[in-house]
Amino acid sequence: IPREEIEHLLNHMYGCLQQASETVYKYCLRDVAVIELFFATGARVYEISNIRAENVNLNTGLIQLMGKGAKERYIQIGSTSVLDILRKYYAENRAAIKKSGYFFVNGRGNRYTEQSIRLMLKKYTAQAGIERNIIRMWTDCIIISIKQPLYRFPFQYGSLHNFLTVFRLYVNILIIIW
């Protein structure tokens, strides 16, 4: 996804947040916090959905994620604006977060599921008028990748690590939109 479209999506979401009534404000705040965290860290939808409240340190910006196979990893939020929105979200939803044990909660006070995150992103993307077909973009990426010899990937992307980072980003985007 081009950076301009991510910015357009976030600008739309912040606009919705500013116009939100008192009853839906905390849900819009949650949605902005989820998307900001997703794009700021490259975390998987599953990882964001399963963040436990005790694994988030809003003072230091350190968040412990539990990935596939119960592998844990830590991410550092370096952006003060992302930390600010996470703090606002926590302040607004503190009681529900403490009750459920999960950092991101739905309207019933339960864990905000992966499916709910995908549907939320799809909703805001449509509202923002972003018509990019992420699945088509992913398919094009795979076709291009298959046509190039594997030994060229590290040189094309600077390193194998950069290639795998780009590859993982496309996988995350595909999973969210799907």
Image (tube, rainbow, N blue to C red):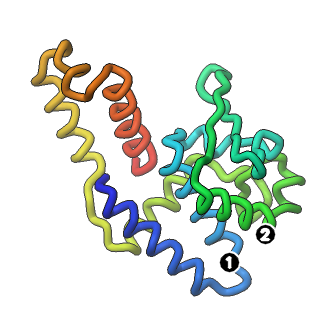
Task: Between residue 56 and residue 27, name the one nearer to us.
Answer: 56
The quarter of the picture where residue 50 lies is top right
Image location (x, y in percent) of residue 83: 66, 57
Please indicate whether residue 145 sits to the left or right of residue 178 in the image: left
Q: Is residue 53 above or below residue 130?
A: above
Please indicate whether residue 120 sits to the left or right of residue 159 in the image: right
Q: Amino acid at mark 1?
A: Tyr
Q: CA gap, disc 2 to disc 1?
A: 9 Å
The quarter of the picture where residue 8 lies is bottom left
The quarter of the picture where residue 126 lies is bottom left
Q: Residues within 10 Å of mark 1 (few under 14, many from 20)?
A: some
Q: Secondary structure at mark 1?
A: helix
Q: Residues within 10 Å of mark 2 (few under 14, many from 20)?
A: some
Task: Between residue 12 and residue 152, name the one nearer to us.
Answer: 152
Image location (x, y in percent) of residue 124: 45, 68
Say if residue 116 shows up in the picture.
no
Q: Label 1 belongs to which residue? A: 25
Are the two marked residues, 2 and 1, in contact with CB atoms closer than 8 angstroms? yes
Q: Amino acid at mark 2?
A: Glu
Q: Label 2 belongs to which residue? A: 92
Please indicate whether residue 70 sits to the left or right of residue 58 in the image: left
Image location (x, y in percent) of residue 81: 59, 62
Q: Residue at x 53, y 39 (%)?
A: 44
